């Protein structure tokens, strides 16, 4: 069994910052404060972590949080209809390959909250291919998402069905690599997000690709990386 846990933004799709815009607009609508000038790199962070940072920076009471989230999801749904998003090269080929066998378990390990992930992927009719997911609703730290994913996978499939090295985390940021390492999973880093090949290489992923287009190299790696 091989469990493939994909990041979303910069890895499966490029939604042209529609999520960031949706969140900043939601924050303005609910609090009246413009947080768009905040110096914050969102890549690799979880939605829970991003919302916490912004709320603390602007001293917003926690009672506003659910209103911000509700507006965020509503804005994101609208943005997905008007922003020119696209699926990253090679993604469909990998999905088409792994969906052929039950041996491969495709899933998500994403900083997006569940509803955000669903909206971004349903737009491309891709959400149905990822029956398993660890989402950024409650965890501020991506490593905690990985621990949560591992726990639930063990519960679902049993301790004996796979080793941690049969989990492969695929993402576009150093945080994806680090969270994979934190649970002794294998990592594939892809430079289709904000980080260059050189920057990602510093974090020593098990496989580093400029895009996911070289499907045969990626499939070979996935099949090989068992113990
Ligand atoms: Mg990403």
Image (tube, rainbow, N blue to C red):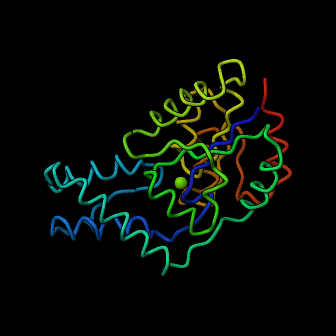
- Residue 49 in picture, x, y percent from top left: 34, 46
Quadrant location of the C terminus in the rendered image:
top right
- 187 or 86: nearer the viewer: 86
- 127 or 7: nearer the viewer: 127
- Identify the residue at image location x=46%, y=51%: 114
- Identify the residue at image location x=19%, y=53%: 57
Left or right of residue 203: residue 1: right
Left or right of residue 66: residue 179: right
- Residue 31 in picture, x, y percent from top left: 16, 64
Above-or-below relation of 136 to 143:
below
- Identify the residue at image location x=51%, y=48%: 110
Above-or-below relation of 186 to 25:
above
Quadrant location of the N terminus in the rendered image:
top right
**Quarter-wise, where is residue 64 in the image?**
bottom left
- Residue 163 in picture, x, y percent from top left: 69, 23
Q: How many marks?
A: 0
Left or right of residue 90: residue 78: left
Above-or-below relation of 92 to 134:
below
Left or right of residue 185: residue 136: left
Determine the residue located farthest toward the top in the rendered image: 160
- 207 or 218: nearer the viewer: 218
């Amino acid at each position: 069994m091989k469990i493939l846990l994909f990041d979303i933004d910069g890895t499966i799709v490029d939604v042209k910052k529609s999520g960031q815009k949706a969140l900043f607009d939601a924050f303005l609508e609910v609090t009246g404060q413009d947080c768009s000038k905040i110096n914050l790199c969102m890549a690799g962070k979880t939605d829970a972590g991003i919302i916490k940072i912004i709320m603390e920076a602007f001293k917003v009471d926690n009672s506003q949080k659910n209103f911000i989230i509700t507006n965020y999801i509503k804005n994101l749904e609208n943005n997905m209809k008007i922003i020119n998003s696209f699926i990253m090269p090679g993604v469909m080929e990998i999905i088409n390959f792994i969906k052929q066998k039950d041996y491969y378990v495709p899933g998500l390990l994403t900083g997006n909250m569940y509803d955000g992930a669903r909206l971004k992927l349903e737009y491309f009719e891709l959400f149905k291919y990822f029956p398993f997911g660890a989402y950024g609703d409650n965890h501020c730290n991506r490593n905690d998402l990985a621990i949560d994913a591992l726990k639930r996978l063990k519960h679902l499939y049993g301790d004996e069905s796979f080793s941690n090295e049969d989990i492969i985390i695929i993402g576009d940021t150093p945080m994806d690599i680090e969270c994979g390492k934190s649970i002794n999973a294998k990592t594939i880093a892809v430079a289709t997000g904000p980080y260059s090949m050189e920057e990602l290489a510093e974090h020593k992923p098990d496989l580093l690709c400029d895009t996911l287009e070289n499907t045969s190299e990626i499939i070979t790696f996935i099949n090989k990386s068992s113990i």
